[in-house]
Image: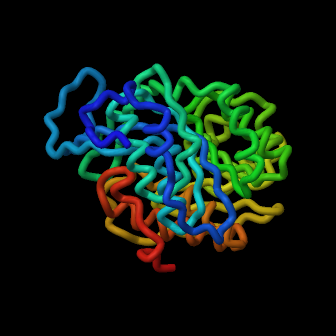
């Protein structure tokens, strides 16, 4: 195993890499949750307020740690009790080495992690004192995931019970993964963030889509500021072939649309200090609850309780709770 963090990741032998990605699997009694997505190193600075274009603002505390929507959701699902496999791509650099070591220590299956000639992804995050944030991502190796890479993991995807996807890797790869999962009878979940134009093809492969109010408006052209608007936007998605939709509404809670019925799941009242990984924790927690046989409403309640803990701490994965911390 490569034990010197100053050693270039490019110098790893095949044996070194295999050892580094050998997982100490836990929670093997649960159905497999496959997460495919991004892996970043987050660099976060806290400031009194977020700058406007052209403005420099002096910040305070700085922190660096693992992040990326795919990684956040994988870590959340693992910590909250899931049996998780994570497929991503990292660079042959210190950030990539640290990321694999971290995911391995979390206990997830890391054998699907691939190496890229591109540098590992990084995210620059600014957070204000009201817990709002803005994020700029340099995709790096995340943008190097191809349809061929996804095909090379077909058997692992087909063996999963739940497939969780986001949009910080190329859309073509996401569509291919969703199609493979759908055709194999896997429950396919998409968190469409960051929002982008999606090919119409993908919707028919989705069992569940989890946008926030901004994302569903961008996807459908229908504002989802209230229950009526959200319902219209949801119907627009369902007409494309999506089975179920959950619209997350920040501090208000979430609307769950299942089998033609809309159910509001309110959020818990907490003192929020940073919302960075709240949505990712929600998605990971929801998939864990579904993997344990809970219905979608109970799963949404579990996800809500999980994300309520996340916003009470700063950072991305540093703020993600463990199963023992959850109070319903």
For residue 322, above or below residue 89: below
Is residue 153 or residue 176 the one in the foreground?
A: 153
Q: Residue at x 24, y 33 (%)?
A: 6
Residue 79 shown left or right of residue 227 in the figure: left
Residue 262 picture location, percent across and down: 73, 64
For residue 286, above or below residue 211: below
For residue 264, above or below residue 54: below
Residue 71 shown left or right of residue 134 in the figure: right
Residue 193 found in image quarter: top right
Residue 229 is at least partly visible in this image: no
Q: Residue at x 27, y 42 (%)?
A: 64
Residue 124 picture location, percent across and down: 33, 34
Q: Residue at x 70, y 67 (%)?
A: 296
Q: Residue at x 32, y 33 (%)?
A: 94
Here the colouring is rainbow
Is residue 64 or residue 310 the one in the foreground?
A: 64
Query: Residue most toward the bottom?
Result: 328
- Picture quarter with the N terminus: top left
Residue 11 is at least partly visible in this image: yes
Residue 83 shown left or right of residue 72 in the figure: right
Residue 97 picture location, percent across and down: 37, 37
Residue 136 picture location, percent across and down: 38, 30
Residue 60 found in image quarter: top left
Is residue 234 or residue 190 the one in the foreground?
A: 190
Count of numbered tags: 0
């Amino acid at each position: 195993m490569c034990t010197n963090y100053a050693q270039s990741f490019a110098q790893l032998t095949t044996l070194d890499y295999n050892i580094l990605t050998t997982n100490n699997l836990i929670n093997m009694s649960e159905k497999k949750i496959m997460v495919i997505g991004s892996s970043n190193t987050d660099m976060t600075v806290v400031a009194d307020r977020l700058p406007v274009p052209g403005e420099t603002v002096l910040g305070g505390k700085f922190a660096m740690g693992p992040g990326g929507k795919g990684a956040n959701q994988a870590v959340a699902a693992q910590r909250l009790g899931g049996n998780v496999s994570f497929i991503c791509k990292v660079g042959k650099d210190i950030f990539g080495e640290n990321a694999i070591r971290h995911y391995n220590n979390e206990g997830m299956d890391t054998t699907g992690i691939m190496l890229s000639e591109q540098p590992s992804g990084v995210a620059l995050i600014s957070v204000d004192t009201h817990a709002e944030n803005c994020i700029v991502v340099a995709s790096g190796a995340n943008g190097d995931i191809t349809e061929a890479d996804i095909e090379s993991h077909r058997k692992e995807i087909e063996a999963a019970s739940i497939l969780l996807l986001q949009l910080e890797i190329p859309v073509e790869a996401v569509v291919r993964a969703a199609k493979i999962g759908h055709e194999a009878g896997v429950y396919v979940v998409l968190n469409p963030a960051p929002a982008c134009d999606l090919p119409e093809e993908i919707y028919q492969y989705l069992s569940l889509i989890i946008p926030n109010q901004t994302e569903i408006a961008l996807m459908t052209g229908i504002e989802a500021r209230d229950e009526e608007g959200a319902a219209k936007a949801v119907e627009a998605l369902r007409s494309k072939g999506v089975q179920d939709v959950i619209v997350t509404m920040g501090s208000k809670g979430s609307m769950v649309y299942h089998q033609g019925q809309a159910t509001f799941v309110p959020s818990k009242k907490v003192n929020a200090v940073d919302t960075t990984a709240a949505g990712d924790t929600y998605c990971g927690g929801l998939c864990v609850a579904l993997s344990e046989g809970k219905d979608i409403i109970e799963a949404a309640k579990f996800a809500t309780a999980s994300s309520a803990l996340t916003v009470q701490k700063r950072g991305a994965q540093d703020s993600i709770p463990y199963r023992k911390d959850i109070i319903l």
